[in-house]
Amino acid sequence: MPRLAASSPLASDSTASTANTKRRPALRAVIFDVDGTLAETELDGHLPAFNQAFADAGLDWHWSPAEYLELLAVTGGKERITHYALRKHAEFARRADFPQLVANLHRRKTELYAARAAAGAITLRPGIRRLLDEIAAAGLLAAIATTTSPDSVRALINGQLGAAGEARFACIGAGDVVASKKPAPDIYQYVIDALGLAADECLAIEDSAVGTAAALAAGIPVVVTAHAATAAENFAGALAVLDGLGAADAPARSLAGPAPAGGFVSLTDLIRWHGSKNQQQSAFAAPQHAQDIVARTGI
């Protein structure tokens, strides 16, 4: 997977701010989460793959959309299966080979998800491709920080961006490359170390409170693009909270903080927000907007 070494010229060309200014250094990298951020993968991709993997293994487990959305509080696929089994199928979880069974289930689930993603069944959220193009044209870096397995990330990127899709990202931090998953900051720290950049030279794009907490714990400012499953979560500390990046036929709506200048989030907006240091200090509470998102997406 693409990875920019810390010895890259970017690492030595620092634009760190001086002690007597409150502005951040210039934005040099945008780090994307995957599930729910690059694409709405959870209900369209991961959930059916989990349920098919359970069926293929002869298990009578079946997660409903509502149950799965609750399980998303547990980050990581293997961790999610383990959590569910311990709560609902204790006898299964007591088996001596339980860890291997979990690994087998997750491996099969990843295969099924990858097949769906490679077939184009999971599409990028509106505005993602446009923003990636803007980042590349400006000479900035794009990167990924996710708890999703590398194979799942690769399948989504190649399925939507083509064979050269991975090359759009200077670093792809995914899966078990770190010991602790979000909301721990480890995956973000891994990515910024690989890029050779300081945390405040980067900006994270996240969709959930768990992911937002991980980025903030690593010292990285965050812009949130919420969706139906996360719209009512607490995004305190984010620079801006929106219902998406927006597109010509679906303008982005601000849920908390600043709104994009032209109806959709551009790199210019991200640079402005990154430099502002404005953060949402109170708990995110916009139930009417959350209900609007749910209504529009049918969840």
Image (cartoon, grey):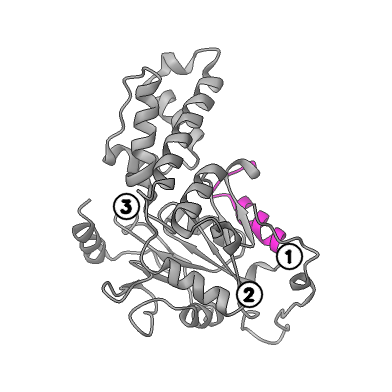
- Badge 2 amino acid: Arg
Residue holding disc 1: 196
Residue 185: say if magenta: yes
Looking at marks 1 and 3 on the same chain, the residue that comes earlier in the sequence is marked by 1
Q: Dot 1: what SS?
A: loop
- Badge 3 amino acid: Ala
Q: Position of residue 213 (x, y in %)?
A: 51, 57
Q: Position of residue 261 (x, y in %)?
A: 38, 85
Q: Residue at x 71, y 61 (%)?
A: 4
Q: Dot 3: what SS?
A: loop
Left/right placement of residue 296 relative to residue 25 reads left
- Badge 1 amino acid: Gly
Q: Position of residue 178 (x, y in %)?
A: 65, 44
Residue 152: say if magenta: no
In this rendering, the label closer to the viewer, 3 or 2:
2
In this rendering, the label closer to the viewer, 1 or 3:
1
Q: Which disc number belongs to residue 28? A: 2
- Give the alpha-carbon distance from disc 1 to disc 2, as whole Å: 11 Å
Q: Position of residue 155 (x, y in %)?
A: 49, 47
Left/right placement of residue 296 relative to residue 243 reads left
Give 118 or 64, whichever is nearer the viewer. 118
Instruction: Write down the quadrant of residue 113 in the picture.
Output: top left
Q: Is residue 239 visible?
A: no
Please report the bounds of the magenta region as a residue range.
178-196
Crowding near pointer 1: few (<14 within 10 Å), some, many (20+)?
Answer: some
Looking at marks 3 and 2 on the same chain, the residue that comes earlier in the sequence is marked by 2
Residue holding disc 3: 229
Q: Is residue 234 above or below residue 46?
A: below
Q: Dot 2: what SS?
A: loop
Looking at marks 1 and 2 on the same chain, the residue that comes earlier in the sequence is marked by 2
